[in-house]
Image: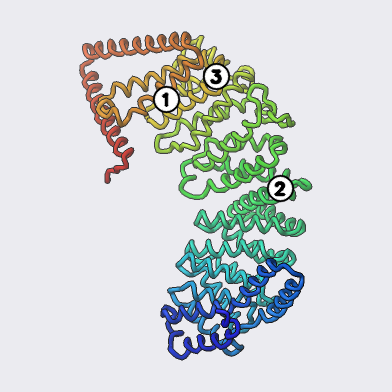
Amino acid sequence: LASVSFCRKELGSLTLAILTTTGASSNAQDEMTQMCFKTLALLIALDRKEVFEDVNSSLVCGTSNDLIINAENRKVRNSSSRTLPLNTVQMEVLVSILRAAVTDLEHYNSTFSVIKAITSMKYTSPGYYDLMDVILKISVQSHKPTVRQQAHQIFMMYFIGYPMGKERIENHLKQIILNIKYEYEDGRLSALGLVSVVIQKLPIPLLEEYTQLFFLPLILQLVNDESKKCRKMVADCISKLLKRISVQLLSSLYDYGIRWFDADGKDAQQLRRTSAQLFGIFVEARIDFMKRGSRIDELLSHLHKYLDMEIRCLDGNTVLLGKQWEMCYFCLQSLDKLNGQVPEITSKYTDVWKSCVKLLIHPHPWVQLTSSKIIQSHLSRLDPYKLVSKGGHSLTSFLVDVPGSLFEITRNLCYQLNAGEEKQIEIVSSLAIKNLAWSIQAMCGRPDLCFKVQESTLISANDEELDESECQQKSTDPILWLMTRLSNIAKRPGSIRRNSIFKCYAAFATLCEATIITPYLELMLEALNRVAVERENSETIKSNENNDLPIVDFPREVMQLLEDKCGTEKFVSAFTNVKSKARDKRDERKQMIAAEAVHDPVASAKRRIAKQGKEKQRKKRRIEERMNSRGVFKNR
């Protein structure tokens, strides 16, 4: 209605009278209370809406006189836009009612609409400042996400736009930081969201003045918070803080990290872990700062020192029970970020890379994963045949500087693929396959990199017995060693492990030239054929052919890839040899069993009993795997 703008004060007074005289203010959930709040919110925000409408209407006016008149009207209205429909005493009453309403467990949008409207008008009073303290508390402690979000928005409107003294600012900032230690995860996430916005919105001089107030509590929360989401948000807050402050302040925070790295005493391990996390954020947020002077060299030296120390102290039996893996993990995280930002510098530190290669066989899967990522990132920048940078940059590689390192990487990757079924992790296996596909090409182009000295041998205790000529060939052919190792791994029972080896063969067939893998077709086909025959002959799989068909077909699909890559003639010749050898071994085994039944009946009976026991276990395992694949788990 057009008369509303002229009757604002009277309408506001009457609405407030309804709140106070009818007792509606004592119950925030009352419908009358909520309608009164909506009315007051509209009345308080009315002038701002009228000004906006006048601005739009002035754009339609066609004469200069109209423009002048509208401009004058806007000036008049703008001068009164800061007036409120209630006087000072009435506003104090309204603020006290609102303070009681927001403490109710059930909040309504109309309550926050009034507070938002008052805040937008820059109203100030002691009661209003007390109301903002309650709003800050609600932004963390409310159990409703929408309420926390609205309280968050209102407090930021107040904190950024209102005049306040240094003491009040400091008290608010301390409370904001204190809220990140709230008991429940949702509340901490809301508090960290507010911290992030404050860090971004505060003027730089004010932010630098209170940097220490933000930095140390955030670091403690980063180390101690059990929630992954909260730790991620804490790291994001620290990153935003580092991006906005001056180089002088950055230097002081950097010195903190260095001192923590060099700490001694009973808390030294925790401080070093904290420092490793902090430097990861430094590298990600301010690589320009890290490039100045010798900071990157200093950081890499510290990373090598403590990685080497952790490797020497590694106890595989207890590392998974405590937090012994965390130092290695966070040091590797920092190294990964450094390698992503400045690979031309990190590639020169061969000692760091040697430690990274050793950690490929660390007991903890996160350490294995991170070290595999770092190795894969380095290898992907190099041409596997020439060991030079693909981009034309002067990128050196530790593979050339450290003889035998290529073989050590390959051996450790095979160790990852040979893990037990319960320890197989898909993402770790995928990275191992990518790295092995690169390694086999490098072995073809530079086989000398696999040997520490000329007389070195690549034969390991896990390989099958070979005759003298095969041993001689294998000791000088790293690709033969790798193929034999993968074939031996595939002999062990376990569908996940075997499928990883077959994926590795598929990667070889896809990425490598035919000349690399053709001489070793028989080794690959031996493992593929063995598994394919086992699965086809299994009574359990035959009875459930439709359910397990994709699993049975996978070895056949890999064989088809190998045939397409190497050519049908060579594939058929190798496959015939594999079939012939398998048949000869089977006939020899049957003859041995028949002879044993005649010469040693007791041993033969024990063999049959053991075979029957294994068959029962196999059938039981198949049934459990099939049930698990359907989502049915047996209670134990």
Residue 341 is left or right of residue 628, and the answer is right
**Which amino acid type corresponds to the residue marked 3 in the rendered image?**
Ile
Residue 287 badge: 2
If you read the primary sequence from the N terminus, does the residue marked by circle 3 or circle 2 appear first?
A: 2
Residue at 66 percent of width and 72 percent of height: 54
Number of marks in picture: 3
Q: Which residue is mark 1?
A: 490
Residue found at the very far front of the displayed protein: 63
Residue 479 badge: 3
Give above or below for 216 relative to 10: above
Between residue 213 and residue 163, name the one nearer to us: 163
Asked if the residue under mark 1 is in contact with the one under mark 2, i.e. CB atoms within 8 Å, the reply is: no
**Which amino acid type corresponds to the residue marked 2 in the rendered image?**
Ile
Q: Position of residue 165 (x, y in %)?
A: 70, 78
**Which amino acid type corresponds to the residue marked 1 in the rendered image?**
Ala
C-alpha separation, residue under disc 1 versus residue under disc 3:
17 Å
